[in-house]
Image (tube, rainbow, N blue to C red):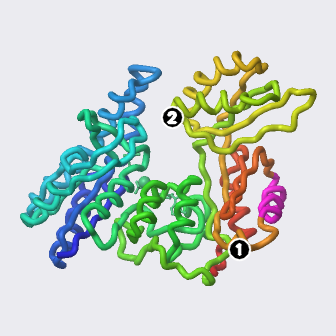
Amino acid sequence: MAIVVRKYGGSSVADADKIKNVARRAIEAQEEGKQVVVVVSAMGKTTDGLVKLAQQVSDEPDERELDFLLSTGEIVSCTLLAIALKAMGAKSVSLSGAQAGIKTDAVHSRARILGIDPRRIHKELDRGKIVIVAGFQGITDKMDITTLGRGGSDTTAVALAIALGADTCEIYTDVDGVYTADPRLVPEARKLDEIGYEEMLELASLGSKVMHSRAVELGEVYKMPILVASSFGNSPGTLIHGGVSMEARNKVRGIAHDLNVAKVTVVGVPDKPGVASAIFDSLAKANISVDTIVQNASIKGITDLTFTVARTDLKKAMKVIEPVVKSIKAKECVSDSKLAKVSVVGSGMQTAAGYAAMMFRALYEAGINIELITTSEIKITCIIDEAKTSDAVRALHKAFELDKGV
Ligand code: ADP
Ligand code: ASP
Ligand code: MG
């Protein structure tokens, strides 16, 4: 019997009526003859509320305890959904990530899935139950609860679909698919019927939060098609898969933006071997990922080194950097967290000239200053003032004629 894995995000299970809606849809899928697994996120903004509570009792909440706390959000929604299903007469069981067999490493707040033991889920499905799994969490070999990073329920769903041998993984959310830009910022944004893994991965990594980037990465590696669709309507959604025709693609596929950006500048760095290594080694040891890096040309043997980190990592990064700044005899370290990242993404760009120039011109004409630039074969990224994000995304969407289609 075909297995389907469906995931519902926070806004799709935000209240009792919405949970009942998800339950009804799960029963319909079972009546169509499928074995149904539903992964849920925490209700509404529950996870944000739990983070705030932890911050009220500590400036730097202990990472193990914070993960355990945050995992409870998904336990609430998954048990409520199973209760709703049983009340409707369906057979169902709720499972935490640990009960579902999801094993992770011990990197709290961004744990990676090491493997899934699917036996319990298969057993429950074979008994005719609709299986509800709490997203975003797993368990280490020492039996500690971990979380997979914000937005990580998408990754739970794709990983489960792979481990269970499902045909597709369906991600249900509050928009009806993947758009050429965040439809909340750009009303003219166009829904895509399909998108390749590579482009979706780039959009997700650059901030399009409609999909967790690690979910797309898993989908690509294991060739699992992922459908993104609305929890509320019945429109067809967007299929993320590997078979998108090369020639049919627009050169620019979409615009991504990310507000979780902070810039750190180490000022007055002696320009000699080993300095960059000392700075970035210390950040790597603290598990902080660094994004854009720019080193200025040195004047009289002194240079500045600028890089960006997630805004949520800034405090930790500054703490780690301070002793390094002293040891390498740099002048000081300053930061700015009121920044955003806007990116133009498209795999067709690598063979076409003039895309960077077009992006810079569009930002200039919208009166937006560019602080940092990075490029790769399929994206161009600029760091700008956070207050200009909407203007920038709209200007770029227009300049690249994304409202007009392929
Ligand atoms: P969920 O709680 O269902 O996981 P998220 O809030 O994580 O939902 O993701 C859905 C949101 O992603 C949408 O409401 C939308 O504002 C945003 N988004 C950002 N970029 C895009 C895009 N390119 N296409 C669709 N939605 C996008
Ligand atoms: N509840 C978690 C979050 O808010 C995980 C998720 O929604 O995917 O980030
Ligand atoms: Mg999400």
Q: Is the residue 121 above or below the residue 263 in the image?
A: below
Q: Upstream in the sequence, badge 2 or badge 1? A: 2
Q: Quadrant of residue 248?
A: bottom right
Residue located beneath label 2 in the image? 287
Residue at (88, 27) in percent of width and height: 301
Please identify the residue farthest to the right as the structure is shown.
300
Residue 362: quarter of image = bottom right
The picture places residue 240, in percent across and down from the top left corner, at: 46, 71
Q: Is residue 238 visible?
A: no
Instruction: State the CA–CA distance, disc 2 to disc 1.
Output: 39 Å
Give the number of the disc on residue 63: none
Residues in magenta? 356-367
Whether residue 283 is visible here, answered yes or no, is yes
Task: Name the amino acid type tagged 2.
Answer: Asn
Give the quadrant of ligand 3. bottom left
Specify the quadrant that holds the N terminus: bottom left
Taking the spot 25% from the left edge, 57% from the top edge, the residue there is 19
Q: Amino acid at mark 1?
A: Glu
Judging by the rendered image, the residue that carries numbered circle 1 is: 401
Q: SS at mark 1?
A: loop
Q: On the rendered image, what quadrant is the C terminus found in?
A: bottom right
Q: Give the main secondary structure of the magenta stretch.
A: helix
Q: In what element is the residue under mark 2?
A: loop
Q: Identify which residue, 70 or 174, lies in the foreground.
A: 70
